[in-house]
Image: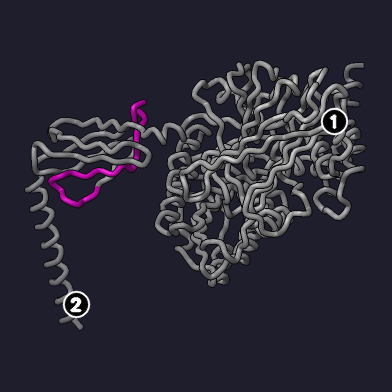
Amino acid sequence: MAYLDNNFFFSSVKINLLAILLVLCHCAGAQYYLRGEVQDEKGKPLESAKIRIQSKGTYLFFSGANGLFGIPVSMAKDSITVSYDGYEILKKEIDCRVFQTIVLKILPSTATVMQKRLASRTTNLSTEDNNNFFTALGESYSSYIENKFVETGTYPETGFSLNIDRASYSNMRRFINNQLIVPADAVRIEEMLNYFDLKNPDLQNNYREFICETFMSNCPWNAKTKLFNINITAPRLNLDSVAPASFTFLIDVSGSMDRPNRLPLLQSAFKLLVENLRTKDTVSIVTYGGGVHIALAPTDGSNKNKIIGVIDSLYADGDTPGENAIRTAYDIARHSFIKNGNNRVILATDGDFNVGQTSDKDLEDLIAFQKQSGIYLTCLGVGMGNYKDSKLEALAKKGNGNFAYLDNIDEAEKVLVKEFTKTMYSVANDAYLNVKFNNEVVKKYRLIGFDNKKGALNDSTSSISGGEIGSGHNTTAIFEIELQEEITNDTAAIALLKLNYKKPESKQVVVKEWPSIIRQSQLNKVPNRILFANAIAMAGQIFKQSAFTKNYTFNDVLKIAEKTVDPFNAQQSEFLLILQKAEKIYNNRNNKKKRKSD
């Protein structure tokens, strides 16, 4: 045994001596130390930029923190090539004795992605000011400017983004169920409408084209105006025939998630999703809390017990390094990328990032770069008290994806099981609808919901941010319009609708047009599902404390909703209960205000 130990000792010495000799040889050949930094045109450091030195052959180096790098080289003069996703590749001759400042130019396509994006835009319309941000109970919400009436003769054309986001409705429900006033900026009316499936019930199960319906009805809060409803239904896919999926679960396990309505809820939610996996689907799991960890390497959907075992093993602890976690998740997603498949990162968190890049703008820029990889992003928000709605909303919109808020396990089942294909399988990217009103019919109009952030409105380079549309999703948009006093042509179109989108895996823009012709005689022939949508829009405006509905209450909404609700639809029936609770909460607040003023 002693003989073996001695041999092992001398072998170790030989190996160590050989390693030292190799290092000395390398250093002997490295007579210079090339130092420098990589940054963009605005001076922002670019971390993890790829660096190649001609004399080093195929060796690949990376810029570190603050974009800095240091590389031993053997020549005084050499050639350097630097690349970074979203930027032009730079190649140039360098003097290795001089500190190098490498400035990369942003690609035009990336610059477009980095623009501030609008939910809606009316051509050449001026803007006004508002607050950037609102915080309630430690929660953060972006602040919006409500769309106003626009004169058709001056501004006939408007457009708005289409997406499947519906987080605002379940978040509003959480406030009401906890007997709390809903923060005005937590309410996004288009997401409240998105929550409900209001498509034509006569549609067949599998339809391959977008379908558009338009209606006009009386406005419940203004006798002088009408409501113009646009109802668009996306193509529906058959799950059995769609391409394989590569899902990367990015799960927040930081200390703030250690509550029943956070990590335990997400664990239950993800286990529901796993049950939907097919053998040809793949799952990876990245966690972040006190550090970033790859909890599960890519695993196919047949290993459900293994995947669920990893999910069950998670526990909450540590800080929230969200930036590094996002980078790691996208790296994993790129390594397990399925060509022509459904590649998606699913971020689940309360949104409280406190390590690394944490501002909304920094996180938006980070995700905007990742979007170009062809990987979608779904954000699942949870929690109460420090929930960061503004961050998750921004990430979803910049990341070519969608956003939902899970307030209970029923909502998790709705989003991840009942609406699985809608949430996880895209049929259209960069989708937005352009509406050109006919001045001979419509005097003025305003879009309800689809409001914009102040910063985006005041940026002259802003453009409409087209959204992701999931399989079979139904979108309802509502305009309040004032008709011309005299309409000479009863068959004239109210508006021309133009849908713009790209099919998945394609950069070609597809355009579909629908002229909308609605006669006055059709006012009383509007289906209940559309009138129910009007009730949702009215409730959303009261929640937002809109000037357009300031003399109305939730009781007024109830009168409409009760007449139009589908009694066999659980979600619509629940809406009535929410209205009843809201009426009591807001009445109590108003009564307290009156007593104080008296």
What residue did someone put label 1 on?
520
Residue 209 in percent (x, y) is at 63, 50
Task: Please name which of the two marks, 2 or 1, marks the residue nearer to the observer.
Answer: 1
- As drawn, 31 above or below 359: below
**Residue at image location 32% in from the left, 31% down from the top:** 105
Residue 5 circle label: 2
- As drawn, 105 above or below 291: above
In the rendered structure, does residue 361 fall within the stretch colored magenta?
Answer: no
Q: Identify which residue, 520 or 7, lies in the foreground.
A: 520
424 relative position to 40: left or right? right
- The residues colored magenta run 40-60
User: Mark 2 vs mark 1: which is more N-terminal?
Assistant: 2
| Secondary structure mostly taken by the magenta-highlighted segment of the chain | loop
**Residue at image location 52% in from the left, 58% down from the top:** 247
Q: Residues within 10 Å of mark 1 (few under 14, many from 20)?
A: few
State the separation of the CA atoms marked 2 and 1. 99 Å
Q: Is residue 247 at least partly visible in the picture? A: yes
